[in-house]
Image (cartoon, rainbow, N blue to C red):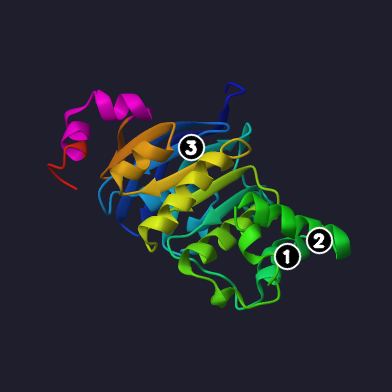
Amino acid sequence: MSYKDKIDIKQLNVWFGEKHVIRGVDLKIKSNSVTAIMGPSGCGKSTLLRSINRMNDVIKVCKVTGDVFINGKNAYEDNTNVYDLRRQIGMVFQRPNPLPKSIYENVAFGPKIHKMASGKALDKIVEKSLRAAAIWDEVHDRLNDSAFDLSGGQQQRLCIARALAVDPEIILMDEPCSALDPAATAKIEQLIRVLSNDYTVIIVTHNMQQASRVSDYTVFLYLGKIIEEGATKGIFENPQHELTEQYITGEFG
């Protein structure tokens, strides 16, 4: 694995009971880039994403084979500390899911749990994370207000700040704009581009325009298999597989 490859997935298979959802996936994700995973509903996009931080483990009927190397270390080794793995890999979900706490406590929650800081050092982490999520200017004078007082787009950026607060290396985003209006979506998309300067970002989306706008690399997944992957510009302007072209041109989806 070269130094540019942050994640190296090898022959990944995922089953939920008898249903074979991910089928022999091989995929490399480069550091400090945005990779979009696109495909029709039910093709396994979210399952593939959740395999990276082993979130599928919480589903009792889930079975996984294959390897996911992160910085050269296999996340599926028996001695892997899943708790530490998920600190290394932040996750942002489809709908904003702030905790029933203040804005400040939402961001401070992770660093407190991981015993990273307290007092003024914790204050600095909260401010840094909110700034990185491009929401500090909107909330700095009301940190003690409930997170539920924020708009949907602000809540999603707060959730991104919460993910950043534990100092991850990778950020997974599962349809992060699907519940947002166009203005809020534009802010999140702009933020994704900025975050890739410091983090490796992987975004699941069914929105092809969004994939073309925000990503450096695109993966087209269909029925649990990677049909095509590569630089986003090439995927959209010169797809090599007929299925990819049909999906991009709207023949199915």
Instruction: Give the residue at x 66% y 57%.
Output: 130
Mark 3, Cα crowd under 10 Å, few <14 / some 14-19 / many 20+, is many
Residue at image mark 3: 34
The amino acid on which the numbered mark 1 sits, given as a three-letter code, is Ala
Q: Is residue 170 left or right of residue 48?
A: right
Mark 2, Cα crowd under 10 Å, few <14 / some 14-19 / many 20+, is some
Where's the N terminus, which quadrant? Answer: top right
Specify the principal SS of the magenta part: helix
**Distance between the Cα atoms at labels 1 and 2?**
7 Å
The amino acid on which the numbered mark 3 sits, given as a three-letter code, is Val
The amino acid on which the numbered mark 2 sits, given as a three-letter code, is Leu
**Span of residues in magenta:** 229-247
Instruction: Give the residue at x 42% y 39%.
Output: 214
Q: Are marks 1 and 2 in contact (CB under 8 Å)?
A: yes
Instruction: Give the residue at x 52% y 33%.
Output: 33
Which numbered marker is on residue 122?
Answer: 2
**Distance between the Cα atoms at labels 3 and 2?**
29 Å
Q: Does label 3 or label 2 sit earlier along the sequence?
A: 3
Which numbered marker is on residue 108?
Answer: 1
**Distance between the Cα atoms at labels 3 and 1?**
26 Å
